[in-house]
Image: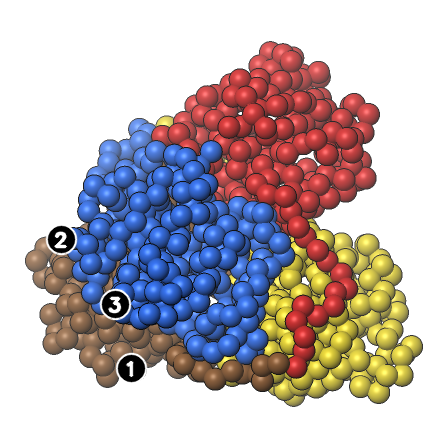
Chain colours: A red, B blue, C brown, D yellow
């Protein structure tokens, strides 16, 4: 069913080239690790990275993208504003957007949320349990009651985002924190999903359940309709008495 | 794609037998008029009516139903409470429910909403325009900016339901009223959609856009996942320090 | 400011009379422990219990109640349906309702939610941290980032309630669970707040922060307006062309 | 009760100086017409306009503002980005924001919404009825079932904003359109209310019900709590086992 959904996985792709620890976990980049299992499920997947021309996000690429997946961390400021404008415009027109982990601080996510998107964090030895709080939601399809990640960076509340329209996951951390880890939004005609896990030094994107959530989210965020949004000056729709 | 969704269309089926004006519009019953276009789209459709044993809603029928569509009006009180219990239980387990028009006062809808579900109404010569306010929503797929119904009964605010989790349509009536005409809810694992139009003396269910909305709603309300909801006493999920 | 808010604290009041362990913590009943700090803040407070005539919830009492606080556990089934009808009617008319802890399984809460209100639980030695996830919400006014309760019964997800309209608290438990512990709803003209803590054998209602939340919730749930809800047959509001 | 709420009414204040028709309706500016009835109710009110230094929105003014009311139309582009940054920051910290009518296209509103905020419009001879769909909401306090405005500019759906967290008003227009005219949002610790009416050539801000809504909205949007939002690196809140 999902073969017609066209995904672009965008990755900053700097940590992998600068930090051997990250390269050891993701030798071909985080984008490659995310893309591979999506391809196996029949999605049409391309990747794009920061240092390509136009960050790999040309008008042509975006026009041919149903769902954009976003991972960034150390170089949010290097993303050019005109590319952010372009991505935002495509989201409003209906392209889905899945923002991962440290992408909470990306320009595009902050732009679409209108808030600081700030949070608490700790690089430590936390265990994370992601509890499903909306078991009926398509993004939770096929999961057990919770996902266990043995080692992850902690993100804690308060998470400065608008109240999510649907909340799918809440994380429990062994250090005592909780986090709204799966948050759904609508902006214009576009569906947005924020998903928390994915620290660059840890093998989170090799975790089968994490891969499943990303695939579910891509299906959910893909546009379901040819949109008809009409704005501007208009004559009356009925004759006024 | 939708052939695997199994729909049961439930109809009170009294007006059609008592009122020649209704029978003229729906000679085989409102349920038949709703079922036919769904079958054409590949849904597996059965019908059930009030005066059948167990109102046609046996355990077996409900177990084999993904989405239940409900039309009732003059005999809400004749629906037995144990059948309402059974339907509610199935909704909580994941069966979708599409409630039409005067079904706002059905026992099952009031049970799931927790409110009076009361509203204003007028049988007159109103024209209704149903404006799409969530064009990205799957229930609006394929529609124009609004649906025109030349003659309909008016339903007006205040509509005493909980704030919908998503609002898809707002109706405009020529007599000066508005109404939240397409309301989405979650109850347990079940998705619920209330859709306003459908007065029994008018050919509303022969309207192509109304048929399209009902089909879209059935697709949307169908369960997307095998549910894993676990309740009750539980040991600790991690070892406590 | 709050002297005009009239609160009725309802308590089942059975554990305290049957279980010396509970009586040791709440010698005059849980209702008395909840009522006292509210009175100190200037609320007008009365109490009512299950074994009084009409469970202490006569028409007169409810008519003079702005906010009803509800604690029940072992005797939900003893609450008579006609009293539940009466309380529901008053909530729809605008009375606030604050449901505490095991009240999640009360008839009135299930009636207003439309779901099973089921959850996971464990009587153990859990520590609970209630994190504020909506720091701007009036119910969180004056709190620190989280509330610490050294010993509490665990309640875990999945909590089978409709998605809250606002989520104020998420609990972390040392045994590995999370819970949506502060949930806001509207039903009719009434505001409803569910607040998780309060196991009968533990001194939770003597905790200053818990008392603060209950007072904040009472202020928030109190009706702010004389309501004008008009239903039924109506002439056109404008002349139809 | 409201004397401690400090309001700043911001107005572009260009139409009034360029267009005699507008000056005839609002001889001292739209800001003065909005401010006067608020002062009568005991709010502490100042005004600020586009052509003042820093648009009248200095750090000092904003620090002393609990709720900012915003009217703009023809000169949105003249509002400097650094002032928009400053206002956004204050909203996230807890300042309320009430955006009126054509302010839907202001930089600050688009910034906080993340969408185009586009809509349909018509300057014609429409009658507008604003129906209360959330009669229990504090912003609707004291109103009848609907507000009648004999002549107004039409705004029609689709209104490209995120789904409101609470929807208080829906407008009916005689030309056949509907509009979500009273929309509540949270961004950071700030509460935001968008209210539709107020075309510059019409005496809408002299309408008693419109004045009442603006006063109610200011009360609702005022911060209720000293905020404690803590972000950044943090040690574990409990000892990890």
Query: What chain does mark 2 sit on?
Result: C
Instruction: Compute the Cα span from label 3 to label 1.
Output: 32 Å
Number of other residues with Cα within 10 Å of mark 3, as a class: few under 14, some 14 to 19, many 20 or more = few
Q: Which mark is residue B200?
A: none
- Discs 1/2, front: 1
Mark closer to the chain start, 1 or 2: 2
Could you say where residue C86 lies in the image, as x and y percent from the top left?
Answer: 24, 74
In the rendered image, the vertical position of residue A240 relative to residue B235, given as above or below:
below
- Discs 3/1, front: 3
- D4 on left or right of A61: left
Q: Which residue is mark 2?
A: C21
Write the residue at 77% across / 42% down. Answer: A85
Q: From the viewer's side, name the closer residue of D203 and C96.
A: D203
Q: Is residue A82 among what the camera can see?
A: yes
- Residue ranking furthest to the left: C18
Instruction: Compute the Cα span from label 3 to label 2.
Output: 52 Å
Q: From the viewer's side, name the closer residue of B183 and A109.
A: B183
Q: Are marks 3 and 1 on the same chain?
A: no
In the rendered image, the vertical position of residue D180 relative to residue A49, given as above or below:
below
Q: Which residue is mark 3?
A: B75
Could you say where residue D97 lies in the image, as x and y percent from the top left?
Answer: 66, 65
């Amino acid at each position: 069913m999902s073969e017609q959904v066209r995904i672009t996985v965008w990755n900053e792709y700097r940590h992998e080239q600068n930090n051997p620890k990250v390269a050891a976990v993701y030798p071909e980049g985080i984008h490659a690790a995310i893309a591979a299992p999506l391809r196996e499920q029949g999605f049409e997947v391309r990747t794009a990275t920061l240092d390509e021309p136009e960050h790999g996000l040309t008008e042509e690429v975006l026009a041919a993208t149903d769902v954009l997946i976003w991972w960034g961390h150390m170089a949010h400021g290097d993303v050019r504003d005109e590319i952010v404008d372009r991505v935002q415009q495509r989201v409003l027109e209906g392209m889905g957007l899945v923002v991962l982990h440290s992408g909470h601080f990306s320009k595009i996510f902050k732009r679409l949320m209108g808030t600081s998107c700030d949070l608490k964090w700790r690089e430590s030895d936390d265990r994370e349990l992601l509890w499903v709080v909306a078991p009926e939601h398509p993004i939770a399809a096929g999961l057990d009651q919770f996902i266990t990640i043995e080692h992850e960076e902690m993100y804690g509340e308060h998470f400065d985002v608008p109240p999510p329209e649907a909340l799918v996951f809440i994380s429990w951390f062994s250090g005592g924190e909780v986090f709204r880890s799966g948050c759904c939004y609508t902006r214009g005609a576009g569906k947005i999903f924020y998903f928390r896990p994915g620290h660059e030094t840890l093998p989170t994107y090799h975790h089968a359940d994490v891969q499943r959530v990303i695939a579910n989210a891509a299906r959910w965020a893909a546009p379901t309709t040819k949109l008809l949004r009409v704005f501007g000056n208009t004559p009356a729709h009925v004759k006024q008495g």
